[in-house]
Amino acid sequence: MWSESYKRLLAENKVWANSKVSGDPEYFHRLAKLQTPEFLWIGCSDSRVPANEITNTQPGEIFVHRNVANLVVHTDVNLLAVLDYAVNHLKVKHVIVCGHYGCGGVKAAMTNTDYKLVLNMWLRNIKDVYRLHREELDALTEEEMKFDRLVELNVKEQLTNLAKTSIIQRAWQQEQRPDLHGWVYGLKDGLINVAYEMKAGSVIDDLYKYEF
C-alpha cells in the first residue's frame, strides 16, 4: 500500500501559507515580484542543513544550489547553469560553499565501499581531495578529526574549483565580484565556521587562467 505521509507536507504548507498571510497580507504579492539576492549558496543536499533557516534569512535573499557533499564539478552542467545565472544575471556579490561536519558523502568517500556507478563517480571527486591532502590527513590519528578535516578541505577545494571557471574569472576581471566564502556548519551546535575566503581577483595557478 502506498504511504500517504506526503499529505502531511501539503497540509503543513497550507498552515504555513495562512500564517504568513495573517501576519502580512501582502507577503506573497511582494515576494512574487522580488528576487534580488546578494548570495549564491552551494550547499549539501543533507536535509539538516537548510540555507535560509540556518542563516535566518527570508525567501529571495539567497539563491541556492545543493548536491551531495557541496561539490563544484567542472562537468556538472546543472551547477554551472546556476552559477552562470547567479553571477551574470542576478549579479550576486558573494558565492558561499557551505559544507557540514558529519557529511555522509565525505564519510562515504573515506571508505573503499562500492556504491555502484553513479555514486562512485561522484564520490571520486572527494577522494581526489583526500589524495591532494593525504600527508596532512594521514597524520591525524583520530578518525573523527580526520573526517572533520576532510570536510573542511573539501570546502577549500570547491572554492578553488569555482575560481577555475571562466564565469568567476570574467566577473572578477570586469566587475571585481563575487567574493568566495568557504563555510562549515556544525550539526551539533548550529554554528557556522568560516573556514576559507577568496576575495574577488584572488591569485590562482596560471594554468587555470583564461585570457579575455
Image: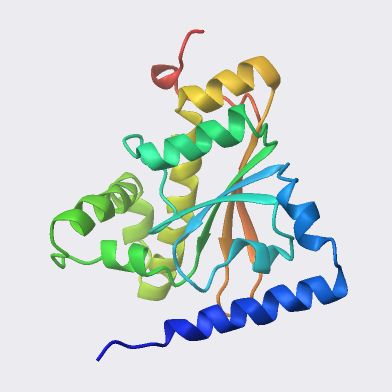
Residue at (14, 55) in percent of width and height: 117
Q: Quadrant of the N terminus?
A: bottom left
49 horizontally vs 131: left or right = right
Residue 85 pos. (x, y %): 55, 33
What residue lies at 72% left-to-right and 42% top-to-bottom?
A: 38
Q: Is any part of residue 16 visible from this angle?
A: yes
Give the camera-side residue of 158 and 122. 122
Please indicate, yes or no, whether residue 160 appears anywhere in the rendered image. no
Protein image colouring: rainbow
Q: Residue furthest top?
A: 212
x and y percent of residue 77 in the render? 36, 37
Q: Is residue 1 above or below residue 58?
A: below
Count the numbered circles shown.
0
Q: Is residue 152 above or below residue 47?
A: above
Determine the residue positioned at 84% across, 61% down.
Answer: 26
Nearest to the observer: residue 7 or residue 96: 7
Indicate whether 185 appears above or below 210. below
Q: Is residue 102 above or below residue 165?
A: below
Residue in view at x 49 percent, y 69 percent: 101
Q: Position of residue 62 (x, y in %)?
A: 66, 51
Residue 143 relative to residue 80: left or right: left
Residue 29 found in image quarter: bottom right
Q: Is residue 75 left or right of residue 95?
A: left
Q: Position of residue 170 (x, y in %)?
A: 56, 18
